[in-house]
Image: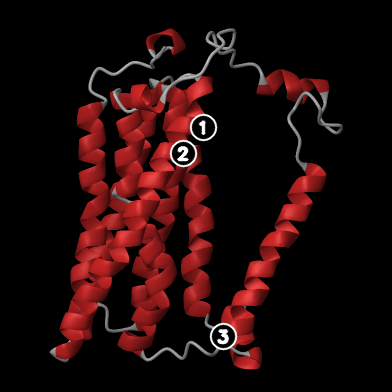
Amino acid sequence: MVPWILGLYGWQEAFLITGALGFVWLILWWLFYDIPSRHKKISPEEFELIHSDHDPDSSHTGSIKWRRLLSIKQTWVFIIGKLLTDPVWWFFLFWLPSYFSSTFNLDLKKPSMHLVIVYAATTIGSIAGGYLSSYLIRKGWPVLKARKTALLAAAICVLPILLARFATDIWVAVGIISIAAAAHQAWSSNIFTIVSDLVPKKAVSSVVGIGGMTGSIGSAFFPLLVGFILDYYKLIGNITAGYNIIFIICGFAYIIAWLIIHILTSGMKPVRFQDLT
């Protein structure tokens, strides 16, 4: 829709309209969301299912200091998972239109099925990633092993992005990048869930906040590297080579993140609330 809005009204309106859609979502959230104990449309069976995974630490009171969370490996599992991969995701979001425009002369002022397919593929990855780890758990796998296996599968599925450098047809590039983008969402669905597997319920939001912050910081600095690489290769008249280097970085980021996570979680057990206070 954005290229259509851009062509019809201008770039300022494209920002205003897409930004305003967030308030529509906010209104719907305000009207329909509530915690299970106060939700008017939840059935007793649903309520029972939500609370079926009883947290033995739920009776504890008090808060957990951030410095204590930063001292345990369980927190760093999520930090590494976000720090090394979030920048890749934001590259997919912000730089792909420019890549298709400069490499395949795609007109960004016209609606493009190429970009629609890439971003729609992420929906499939989100569901498939969660399904895979859940399937393995139902088969009797230990929870952490199932999550790490799903993360490894996602990391491997990102690797074909290395082949984008050889793509001379735009649809081949779309196929390769769609797989990588879907794999990121599969990674994301498991890296978020692994937090609740490893830390007590009272610490989940803090750990997610810390990891989200580090991922955002990495995502803020990564475009500087991307811009530097592209500017350099643009000066020498070979911007495609610049994108090739960036795709190599993106391809290996997930494997490196998984290896670090695998080392950190060796022999790891969920941490208890009393261990953090």
Please give the name of the residue rendered at 20% of the width and 38% of the height, measured from the top-left corner: 259
Please give the name of the residue rendered at 82% of the width and 26% of the height, measured from the top-left corner: 43
For the N terminus, which image quadrant? bottom right
Viewer-closest of 125 and 58: 58
Viewer-closest of 168 and 48: 48
The residue that disc 2 covers is 209
Please give the name of the residue rendered at 35% of the width and 26% of the height, measured from the top-left corner: 67
The residue that disc 3 covers is 11
Tell me how far mark 2 sits from mark 3, CA to CA: 32 Å
Q: Which amino acid type is marked by label 1? A: Ser
- Circle 3 sits in a helix, a strand or a loop, which is it? helix
Viewer-closest of 212 and 170: 212
Q: Which amino acid type is marked by label 3? A: Trp
Disc 2: CA contacts within 10 A as few (<14), some (14-19) or many (>=20) = few
Asked if residue 27 lies left or right of residue 271, the reply is right
- Dot label at residue 93: none
The residue that disc 1 covers is 205
Disc 3: CA contacts within 10 A as few (<14), some (14-19) or many (>=20) = some
